Image (cartoon, rainbow, N blue to C red):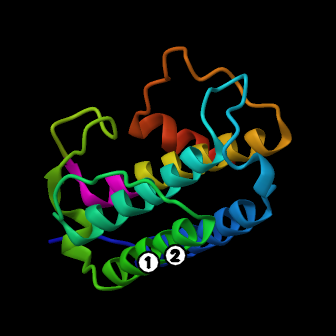
Amino acid sequence: MVFEVPFVRRAYTQVLAHEFKKVVRMVRAFPAERFDERSTGCGESARELAAGFVHRVRTIDDLAYAGAGPLSRPVFRTRGELLLELETAFLGAHTSLAGLSAAEWAELIPSPAGLAVGERSRRGELLWLALRDLITHDRHFARHMTGDCPDRGGPRRQVTPERVLDEIAIGA
């Protein structure tokens, strides 16, 4: 028997939709003349960071759909191509999430590299971790817009389900 509170998946899709809208607004608002400049603090251009959004939304789609395989990171020539690919990835993720049953939400699936600690995790937990990664990337992009980009060369903190749940609970 699978126990699932019905609002969890609905809350997830609402938060994802909110983050997606925020990302699209930020990418559109980023000055075109600085889109390919590398920040002195992080060494990535806004175009590379925006492509990171596409990769993260595709990861969410892959987790929800269960198994498209390894994801590539294509190079986008224009901001329009990037936004189109981002919207396509979001629509795929949204459609996949809408079709998930309670049993599929709780199903154990292989964990993608760098997303979870264990070899296998519950799909719902992995989706929340992937969403947290998207939000963290969103914050990095926002700091990049203001020119206050941190040095990303150091070691990344390890994301654990307990840490994510603690941060969600306190509203971080």
Q: Does residue 172 appear in this view?
A: no
How many numbered marks does the figure carry?
A: 2
Left or right, 15 with respect to 12, comes to: right
Residue 94 image offset from top left, x and y in percent: 42, 79
Kindly identify which numbered label has been placed on residue 88: 1
Residue at horizontal 15 percent and vertical 37 percent from the top = 119
Left or right, 84 with respect to 1, comes to: right
Kindly identify which numbered label has been placed on residue 106: none
Kindly identify which numbered label has been placed on residue 84: 2
Amino acid on which disc 1 is placed: Thr
- The secondary structure that dominates the magenta segment is helix
Q: Residues within 10 Å of mark 1 (few under 14, many from 20)?
A: some
Left or right, 100 with respect to 109, comes to: right
Q: In 3D space, how far apart are the residues under numbered discs 2 and 1 (Cα atoms)?
A: 6 Å
Question: Relative to 135, does residue 95 appear above or below in the rendering?
Answer: below
Do labels 2 and 1 touch, CB within 8 Å?
Answer: yes
The magenta segment is: 121-127
Quarter of the picture holding the N terminus = bottom left
Residue at horizontal 34 percent and vertical 57 percent from the top = 59
Residue 171 image offset from top left, x and y in percent: 69, 48
Residue 121 image offset from top left, x and y in percent: 22, 47
